[in-house]
Image (tube, helix red, strand yellow):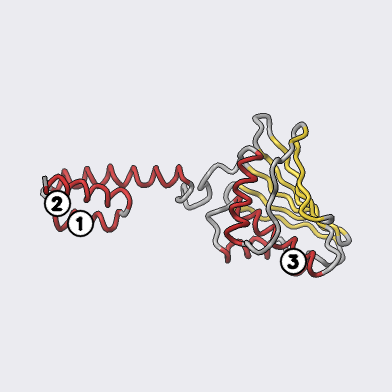
Amino acid sequence: MTAYIKIAAMITLLIFLPPVGWLVMYKYSTFDRLTNVIIAAACLAFFVYANISAGNLSILGGDKSFEVRTTPEVFREKFNASAQRLAPNLDVTIDAPLTVDGQKFRHEFAPNLTLEGTLDDTGKVAELKLFAEPQNQDESFRVINVLGLLIATLNPELDAEDRGEVMRDLRMLKEVSTEGTYDWTTERGLVTYSVHADKGKSTFTAELK
């Protein structure tokens, strides 16, 4: 019985903690080398598959960690989860129900900050637009936070520094509340981000592949 327990523990570690599992296999496995290799390869394949399915690992370098096109309700849940994790003290969640009118839905975070989503033919979100017209520094701060949460929701593989890089690419951190006209575009994974600003009014677009 002890031998079976050891084998089960080794396989469990190989699936959920591959490095530890490999060490345990190297020290304690009673199988021959070929059998060990087959078991390790099978467990590693399951580990990669399970994590890709859960959105924890990336495919081909991190650009396709999960399907970005989801239903509006799934998007709302993911956005709120990002808000609770990254900005729990700010009132920037999307309340239910999220009403869909035809192929569009809208949510107003504030009088000068509105999110609009466009759906594809399957009812999944294909494009998100954030319309902003900040009147002061506090409103500009809210725009920056909502955009950061939007990026975190659509590209969960990005850390805080990478999200900041997206906003720098869009000239977001210094130009969101200034006058002038400009257009900037950047891409991360399956999402193309762009911004169009004209005399204090800004439209941020996230196009989902």
Circle 1: residue type: Val
- From this view, report whether residue 98 is shown above or below residue 135: above
The residue sitting at 73% across, 64% down in the picture is: 172
Residue, disc 1? 24
Q: Quadrant of residue 134?
A: bottom right
Q: Which mark is residue 141?
A: 3
Q: CA distance from mark 1 to mark 2?
A: 7 Å
The residue sitting at 84% across, 58% down in the picture is: 133
Circle 2: residue type: Ser
Residue 60 is situated, as x and y percent measured from the top left of the image, at 46, 48
Q: Quadrant of residue 90?
A: bottom right
- From this view, report whether residue 45 is shown above or below residue 172: above
Residue 142 in the figure: left or right of residue 53: right
Q: CA distance from mark 3 to mark 2?
A: 57 Å
Q: Residue furthest right?
A: 199
Q: Quadrant of the C terminus?
A: top right
**SS assignment at label 3:** helix
Q: Quadrant of the N terminus?
A: top left
Residue 197 is situated, as x and y percent measured from the top left of the image, at 82, 58
The number of discs equals 3
Residue, disc 2? 29
Circle 3: residue type: Phe
Residue 74 in the figure: left or right of residue 38: right
Residue 107 in the figure: left or right of residue 32: right
Residue 156 is situated, as x and y percent measured from the top left of the image, at 55, 53
Residue 52 in the figure: left or right of residue 100: left
**SS assignment at label 1:** helix
The residue sitting at 66% across, 53% down in the picture is: 150
